[in-house]
Amino acid sequence: MMSILHVLAAQPTVDAYTMSPGRITAIVAGLLALVGVGIGGLALMRRGVGRLSIGNRRRGAMVAMALGLISVILGGLVVVTADGGLGTGNGLGGGIVAAILGLIGLFLGWLALTRSPRAG
């Protein structure tokens, strides 16, 4: 016979396709980080690629840094608040990836900002 403690201690099962709040936050942070890395990469280029252009290198660098910072914060929040380890459905892996990509976006934005001419 199961005791009340066994029932209370039982973890709810998370399916592979269940969208928990941690997973959703990690996905949003990862997408923001990918956009930040892309804009930071375009800001480092002189003219962009074909029709892809950000217009102003300085503005693109600032946007890349802002998106990188937001994704580092969101990814870190997911990592800190995750209840279990990897594979538990809490978005821990996605939070780690989002934080790393956010740091890359921050670095690319900073690099483009240091290489952009100063506005007089």
Image (tube, rainbow, N blue to C red):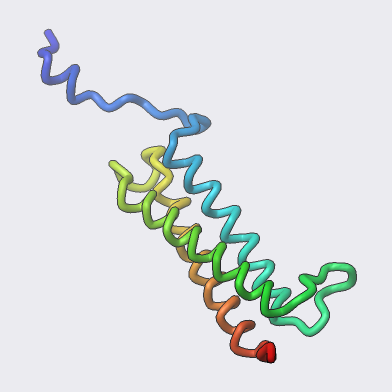
Q: In x, y percent, where is residue 37? A: 62, 68
The mark tally for this picture is 0
Along the line of sight, the residue nearer the viewer: 12 or 40: 40
User: Left or right: where does residue 7 sit relative to residue 100?
Assistant: left
User: Left or right: where does residue 63 sit relative to residue 79?
Assistant: right
Q: In x, y percent, where is residue 27? A: 54, 47
Q: Quadrant of residue 52?
A: bottom right
Residue drawn at (60%, 53%) of the image? 31
Residue drawn at (18%, 25%) of the image? 9
Residue drawn at (66%, 90%) of the image? 118
> From the viewer's perspective, is residue 71 above or below residue 47?
above
Q: In x, y percent, where is residue 16? A: 49, 33
Residue drawn at (47%, 41%) of the image? 23
Q: Quadrant of residue 73?
A: bottom left
> Could you tell me which quadrant the C terminus lies in?
bottom right
* Residue ranking furthest to the right: 50
Q: Quadrant of residue 34?
A: bottom right
> Could you tell me which quadrant the N terminus lies in?
top left
Along the line of sight, the residue nearer the viewer: 61 or 107: 61
User: Left or right: where does residue 24 sit relative to residue 36?
Assistant: left
> From the viewer's perspective, is residue 25 above or below residue 50?
above
Q: In x, y percent, where is residue 84? A: 29, 42
Along the line of sight, the residue nearer the viewer: 28 or 65: 65
* Residue ranking furthest to the top: 1
